[in-house]
Image: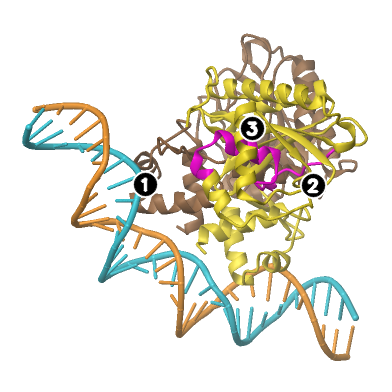
Chain colours: A yellow, B brown, C cyan, D orange
DNA sequence: AAATGTCGTTTTAAATAATGAAACGAAAAC
DNA sequence: GTTTTCGTTTCATTATTTAAAACGACATTT
């Protein structure tokens, strides 16, 4: 494990759980030696990515991480672009809307707009979404570089609910259908009782960089709703893609 | 230079300049060997802090930095708390409002609400504000741990405009006056033609963790305005402090 | 067409940084 | 009053990091 990987792991540990943690606690959580953890924390503090409360000696994520995120947003305005459009979609449909971005860690959910209804679907941010078991994942694979799907289907496919599809051939069918339709349909493959539709967010080369999804409690959705929700999610996802790339979204032909 | 420091420097380099950069370009900017730069980038990519455009091989900051920032905001809602209040202050006064947070890198400006007027003061985010030459810095020192002021005055004090005060004794007077008054007054010490007032944002131990400032073109400000702007900035800064700590803001007596 | 420059990438021995066990006093818990 | 846990420092061992060199693949220039 490289030193860089260790340092970032430590940041992730800091980001989880309690807002402020002790050195010994962090060392235990990250499974590093106490001295190593301390050295990493000092280095990260020096860079402003970690802060320490002067009196209590507790550590927390520093303003530096916000600074990096602000710099990224200035260069690649993913959140600034997508959030207002996602909010509009949530208002229009009345359901929870969330979007994700693909990275080497997989498809990461980066923002959620929760439905105002009492019975709503909660989606944690920062979570890695399994490509084969979520509407977002299927929509993403349908419009991403083909190698991503091949890699995903080559690995062991975990089952999350009794409804999860784990047969590679069946997943290929779902992906093909999503590509033909423009959006994917997720029926309780990841969480029981959750129905969702998702559409790809396209990057400048016409391949998917993420996905936009609407998630609703199964009980509230009539079969007839699927198409209207699907159309709505595709429309908003295209708007996000257009604003992101500065030009008309165009699907790459694989 | 530790490996962690190098990796973070690379992130900072990535955050500056063009949104997407080549390996050779980054190696030059960061002044690392090409092979070293590549290894660091690969490690950072693995952690999602850096992304690479599949086709063009260009690098950019990854979604991981946004993820860390979201985790920090969930634990320590600095931006979520301060932004709406800063916006209200900007609306009320009609001038640019910005706030900063202190870290080991100094006082970093983290958000700016620009005045709607044509003639307005622009403040870049992510910038390190010199403690001795800005209203924010003076207000911060007046209510921070005394050692911070001593450290700042011990270093060489740069001059940014003909009006910059660089005499340590004179700066001590400014700080004392700010502490007595509750807010500091900056008169073109950092940028020519810019007048500003600032008040501290207090943390849970009653010492300053940052500063809130109003910045306006010199020409627009009458001497009589100073007090009303000062009172307004103090009021909003106290509100931010209260919401941040969850209790009534209380100034630590040094 | 040939030559030159730049790109990303891989390899290597040498240099350097990271590691973790041990020990410390201080503080906290028992 | 005792024991545990805390943060911190030290240091020989170990592992990683480093940077020069060489590579083929492109682009650009001659």
Classify mark 3: residues with Cα within 10 Å, few (<14), some (14-19) or many (20+).
Answer: many
Q: Which residue in the protein does label 1 denote?
A: B31
Give the camera-side residue of B55 and B86.
B55
Q: Is residue A136 left or right of residue B62?
A: right
> Are the two marked residues, 2 and 3, in contact with CB atoms closer than 8 angstroms?
no
Q: Secondary structure at mark 2?
A: loop
- Against B31, residue B236 (above or below) is above
Query: Can I make out residue B132 in this image?
Result: no
Q: Secondary structure at mark 1?
A: loop
Q: Position of residue A80 (x, y in %)?
A: 65, 27
Task: Please report the residue visible at 63 percent of the width from the left and 58 percent of the height from the top.
Answer: A10
What is the C-alpha distance between the residues marked 2 and 3?
A: 20 Å
Reply yes or no: does residue B249 show up in magenta: no
Q: Position of residue A141 (x, y in %)?
A: 58, 39
Q: Which residue in the protein does label 3 denote?
A: A178
Classify mark 2: residues with Cα within 10 Å, few (<14), some (14-19) or many (20+).
Answer: some
Q: Which residue in the protein does label 2 denote?
A: A191
Which quarter of the image is occupied by the N terminus of chain B?
bottom left
> To which chain does the residue with label 2 belong?
A
Classify mark 1: residues with Cα within 10 Å, few (<14), some (14-19) or many (20+).
Answer: few
Query: Can I make out residue A83 in this image?
Result: yes
What residue range appears in magenta?
Answer: A120-148
Q: Are marks 2 and 3 on the same chain?
A: yes
């Amino acid at each position: 494990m490289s030193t860089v990987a260790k340092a970032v792991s430590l940041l992730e540990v800091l980001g989880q759980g309690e807002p402020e943690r002790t050195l010994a606690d962090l060392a235990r959580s990250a499974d590093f030696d106490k001295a190593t953890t301390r050295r990493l924390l000092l280095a990260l503090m020096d860079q402003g990515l970690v802060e320490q409360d002067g009196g209590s000696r507790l550590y927390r994520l520093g303003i530096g991480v916000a600074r990096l995120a602000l710099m990224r947003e200035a260069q690649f305005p993913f959140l600034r672009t997508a959030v207002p459009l996602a909010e509009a979609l949530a208002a229009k449909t009345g359901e929870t809307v969330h979007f994700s971005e693909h990275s080497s860690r997989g498809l990461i959910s980066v923002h959620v707009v929760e439905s105002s209804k009492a019975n709503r679907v909660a989606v944690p941010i920062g979570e890695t979404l399994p490509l084969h078991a979520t509407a977002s994942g299927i929509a993403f694979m349908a419009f991403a570089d083909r190698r991503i799907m091949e890699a995903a289907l080559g690995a062991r496919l975990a089952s999350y609910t009794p409804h999860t599809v784990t047969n590679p051939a069946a997943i290929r069918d779902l992906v093909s259908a999503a590509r033909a339709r423009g959006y994917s349909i997720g029926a309780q493959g990841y969480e029981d009782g959750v129905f969702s539709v998702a559409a790809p967010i396209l990057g400048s080369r016409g391949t998917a960089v993420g996905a936009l999804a609407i998630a609703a409690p199964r009980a509230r959705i009539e079969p007839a709703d699927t198409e209207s929700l699907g159309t709505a999610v595709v429309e908003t996802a295209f708007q996000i893609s257009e604003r992101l790339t500065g030009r008309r979204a165009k699907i790459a032909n694989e």
